[in-house]
Image (cartoon, helix red, strand yellow):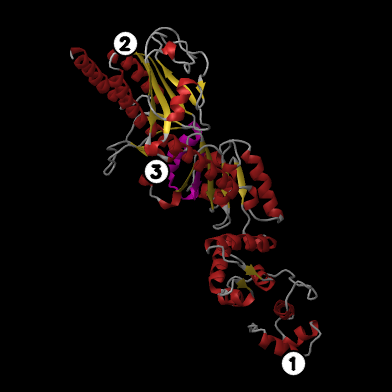
Amino acid sequence: MTGRIQLIEAELDALYLISQILNSAHDLHAKLQGVLEILHKKSGMRSGMITLREIENKGMIVCAVHTDGTGRPTHPVRYNPGEGLMGAILAEGSTIVVEKVSEEPRFLGRLGLYDPELPFIGSPIYIEKGELVGVLAAQPDNSQMLGERARFMEMIANLIAQSVKMLRIIERKQRDLLSERDQLKQALIKNYGFENIIGHSPPMLKVFDLIRQVAKWNTTVLIRGESGTGKEVVANSIHFNSGCAGGPFLKLNCAALPDTLLESELFGHEKGAFSGAVNQRKGRFELADNGTLFLDEIGEISASFQAKLLRVLQEGEFERVGGSATIKVNVRIIAATNRNLEEEVTKGAFREDLYYRLNVMPINMPPLRDRTEDIPELAEFLLGRISEQQGGRPLDIKESAIRLLMKHNWPGNVRELANRLERAAIMSANGIIDRDVMVSTGLEDEIGTGISSKPQKNLSVDLNDESMDDRERVIAALEQSGWVQAKAARLLNMTPRQIAYRILTLDITMKQI
């Protein structure tokens, strides 16, 4: 009886220590190794071994061994279901007790650790829903009370199972996060590839050449152009096609914040640096280390802040607001502005040294009015995005609508075009955007009043094009004839009465000249 009490006390002591080990912050291998060491020292369970099931297949691999100084296996040891004593435990899913190892024919002895004259106990490690994930095995130092010791081993296996379960959950989440990250990166690269900058006009071809050149190097880029010309799209393309693509890409609109907040956003702040600074915060420069920082509307920053920005651009170092420690970063800068910085420098509103530091590699984005030949392709691309936003709704734009778009001056550039097309898509009940739908958005009224009119290129259309339907053909003829029905009738080899009937039956809205 005294021996049984001593065994129970030893096992309770071992259980307490093992629970502490398994709840520690160590990695799983260190925890399992600690469990085997406690089993040996506190409960007389020698030559402990823990095997875990491999996720990829049904076999097990030895993950931890307590050798008691006899040496560890120099190569991975695996067991398949039904293979040897360990394989039997894996296949049967129940504890196996062997009174004497030398008398057990299934014992393979691959590790060369076990005393053939001593017993052997192996218990399965189960997690939720009866999923067997491994085996805990060891040799009692004597053959007394093997039933008690087997139950003790099952208790330890249950404790191990909880740690393995948590590890598997964490590993699954990490795999899911890594997979999601990789998918998002691929989506970003796809969304910001060169093919998503639409245009084949000479000004845009020049922009493409510059983007391909600057993407190769970690040089500062200044993107210049009117609002809505796609400066941010170009910045994205430069980053995601450069050597920094694997690093962070952060953006900041410099015009959106006053100097005090701008300094905190870019450089960060220490706890207590100002009212409301309850915690330390990293700034955009620090977060963008080994990546890219896009500073939009750089021409809007004040003269006082320009000096602070110049230092970090030149030296790559700064201090957080309220801090004294100098922080060094490696950040690629892409800036953008719609201002004439040369005039700002002449007026003294923009530092000359900062201008030259930013203007290392300028890219000038052409306004849409200077590349109207890109409008058909742009319209198709933008409608594709609008279609996705509207749940995959089919959208089709007719030539008559395209010709109307090409007559507009587009003071808001591509952004205005996108907004106009989205409005047209909403106003089109059947998803077909023709001239009348575009007129309903107010576009022609602007042209007619001269708000955005410009000298027009010859937009004549082949009226014999078989791909055009009757409505499109009549509209094209009316446009070429200046909306004079008699002239349009002659172009279509019709009488004035015939074209008037077509206009009525095809529900064409006549433009008032």
Task: Tell me the number on the disc at residue 281.
Answer: none
> Which one is earlier in the sequence, the residue at label 1 or at label 3?
3
Give the image location of residue 96, x and y in percent.
39, 23
**Label 3: few (<14), some (14–19) or many (≥20) C-alpha neighbours in 10 Å:** many
Q: Which residue is mark 3?
A: 265
Q: Which residue is mark 2?
A: 142
Q: Amino acid at mark 1?
A: Arg
Q: Quadrant of residue 508?
A: bottom right
Give the image location of residue 72, x and y in percent.
46, 12
Give the image location of residue 217, x and y in percent.
61, 36
Q: Amino acid at mark 3?
A: Glu
Residue that protrudes farthest toward the bottom in the picture: 497
Q: Amino acid at mark 2?
A: Asn
Overall secondary structure of the magenta section: helix
Residue 277 belongs to the span the image colors magenta: no
SS for tag 3? Answer: helix
Indicate left or right for 407 with 292 as reference: right
**In front: label 3 or label 2:** 2
In the depicted view, which residue is nearer to us: 241 or 144? Answer: 144
In the depicted view, which residue is nearer to us: 143 or 185? Answer: 143
SS for tag 1? Answer: helix
Quick check: can you spot residue 285?
no
Q: CA distance from mark 2 to mark 1?
A: 115 Å
Q: Give the magenta part as a residue range.
A: 292-315
Task: Tell me the number on the disc at residue 497.
Answer: 1
SS for tag 2? Answer: loop
Q: CA distance from mark 1 to mark 3?
A: 69 Å
Q: CA distance from mark 3 to mark 2?
A: 69 Å
**In front: label 2 or label 1:** 2
**Label 1: few (<14), some (14–19) or many (≥20) C-alpha neighbours in 10 Å:** few
State which quarter of the image contains the N terminus: top left
